[in-house]
Image (cartoon, grey):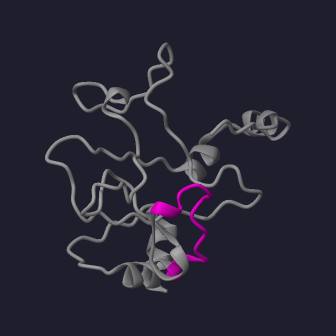
Amino acid sequence: QMLRRTWLQAGLLVIRGLDLSPDNFASISRHFGVLGPVPAGREHAKLGPGGCILRIGNVRDQTGKLISQPSSTKENVLLDGSSQYRPAERLPVWHTDGTFKETPEAGTALYCRQAPEEGGATCFADAASAWEGLAFDQQQHLLKLDCICSL
């Protein structure tokens, strides 16, 4: 419960130095809520109990078969590694997990087994704080709109 309270207060929880199996990772993740299923079409990259973990990256098995879901391509990121959105190019692609669901998961748990020597940046945004920072009239205007997810 302490981890969940800390996460809810801070909006982001970083825990370093753990060596977790997929089962251990799933077990810790369940402290924060029900685990959502891996999206359809990504069966090749499922791990953990019931296939509740999606392996992201460029990991391949001994035969060279891709056993992970690529997160993006190098071309989507600026040479300096910035993931700042560039409207003219509509790149890099960013997303919020679960936006296609009527009730999205409360958050996403990430566990890095092997980080690249350079690049591989992941950015986080606090949508709840962004909403709370809007003026009341802006919130009221947005509540009248429908959002269409194109991912």
Majority secondary structure of the magenta segment? loop
**Residue bounds of the magenta highlight:** 30-44
Specify the farthest residue to the left.
117
Looking at the image, which residue is at 55% across and 80% down?
A: 50
Specify the farthest residue to the right.
144
**Horizontal and vertical percent position of residue 29:** 47, 77
The reply, left or right, for residue 131 in relation to residue 92 is right
The reply, left or right, for residue 16 in relation to residue 96 is left
Give the answer, above or below, for where 28 lies relative to 37: below
Give the answer, above or below, for where 109 lies relative to 127: below
Q: Quadrant of residue 80?
A: top left
Give the answer, above or below, for where 59 lies relative to 37: above
**Horizontal and vertical percent position of residue 105:** 62, 64
Looking at the image, which residue is at 50% across and 18% down?
A: 87
Quarter in which the C terminus is drawn: top right
In this orientation, which residue lies closer to the viewer: 53 or 77? 53
Q: Quadrant of residue 3?
A: bottom left
Looking at the image, which residue is at 70% across and 50% down?
A: 100
**Horizontal and vertical percent position of residue 5:** 49, 77
Q: Does 148 appear in magenta?
A: no
In this orientation, which residue lies closer to the viewer: 47 or 99? 47
The reply, left or right, for residue 69 in relation to residue 96 is left
**Horizontal and vertical percent position of residue 43:** 53, 63
In this orientation, which residue lies closer to the viewer: 132 or 39? 39
Looking at the image, which residue is at 61% across and 68% down?
A: 37
